[in-house]
Image (tube, coloured by chain):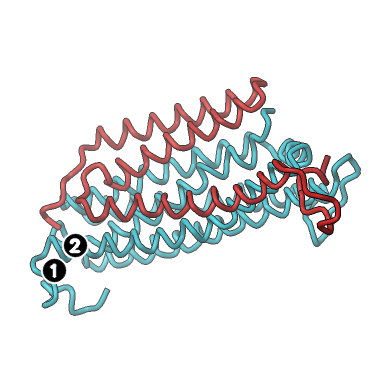
Amino acid sequence: MASAKVVPVRTYVLTFIALLVLLGLTTGLAYLHMGVANTVLALAIAVIKMLLVVLFFMHAFYDKGLTRVAMVLGLLWLTILIVLSSADVFTRNWTPVPHDWGPDISLQQKTK
Amino acid sequence: MSESAVTQAGRPVLEQHFADLPAQEEARKLGMWIFLITEILFFGGLFATYTIYRELYLPGFIQGSHLLEVKWGAINTAVLIVSSLTMALAIRSAQVGKRKSAIIGLLGITAILGVVFLCIKFILEWRTDYLHHLVPGINFDYAGPHASHVQLFFLFYFFMTGLHALHVMIGIGVVLALSYLTWRGRFSPHYYSPLEVTGLYWHFVDIVWIFLFPLLYLIGGR
């Protein structure tokens, strides 16, 4: 392990300050009413914070190829999980369902 | 970590199935990352379900979110960010061979911040929610519109923050165990992978909260 890079304290402190600034930003933005943009911005800031933690606190910035592949794969499986699950539910009312096909399977129409 | 992996002097021994010591260290980190992938998917199931129900019942979720105190969520995020910094500095101290007391001190602060997080979560938040009759299955009683959807939001809230709190508790336990091992002189600049991989776990738990905070406390603005 003596071969592992020693990250300067300065890098850790700067990452820490950036994380606190982004926390303030995301909290502040929540009090402005921007509709969907609220969610998009909050998630974008969360992703930036995640990248800062992964790159510097978790040393991904200094890691070798195989470990990085593992990290990217984790995100890939998560994306598949969320996108494919959502793709089913959110597209059910894109096309009309003939009424003689049985019970209404369109979740979104029911809730309106 | 088996006893055979370390000699008395805190130097790592090369296991026979690795080409060299860096490869051995890399394998430990990779193993931790593989575990963290299973954790991402463990939480991911909840995040996926949350996404779907939030989209279906958005008005109820916004109302539920507005019943939470942003201030505690934000303060807890800051607490975890500070604890991640102290964890990273503790590992660095071991890496550059600082005094044992410096490493133990930083690990101690990390554990204490974990406890502070849990105190805010359980005593200042969950207890208040309980007193306001917001706990599904125990005393949920909400008179406003979309009551059943608000209840669903609180189910997600308690389950996701509860699972996260469980991870913080496990993290505190491991950090305290590592403080003991540091005091026993088990680590050196040549061998500190238990600290390194525990750091990965601690930062991962921090990241989960970084997403839980906007998703639970900040729905639809405030």
Q: Is residue B96 left or right of residue A74?
A: left
Kind of residue sitting beneath label 2? Glu
Q: Residue at x 55, y 51 (%)?
A: A84
Residue matched to label 1? B12
Residue A103 falls in which quadrant of the image? bottom right
Q: Position of residue B47 (x, y in %)?
A: 58, 51
Q: Position of residue B76 (x, y in %)?
A: 55, 42
Q: Position of residue B19 (x, y in %)?
A: 8, 68
Kind of residue sitting beneath label 1? Pro
Give the color of chain A as drawn. red
Q: Dot 1 falls on which chain?
A: B
Secondary structure found at label 2: helix
Is the N terminus of chain B in the top left, top right, bottom left or bottom right quadrant? bottom left
Is the C terminus of chain B in the top left, top right, bottom left or bottom right quadrant? top right
Distance of mark 1 from mark 2, alpha carbons? 10 Å
In front of the other: label 1 or label 2? 2
Q: Residue at x 38, y 64 (%)?
A: B35
Q: Is residue A36 above or below residue A111?
A: above
Q: Residue at x 67, y 54 (%)?
A: B158
Q: Nearer the viewer, residue B60 or A89?
A: A89
**Cβ atoms at labels 1 and 2 below 8 Å apart:** yes
Q: Which mark is residue B25?
A: 2
Q: Which mark is residue B56?
A: none
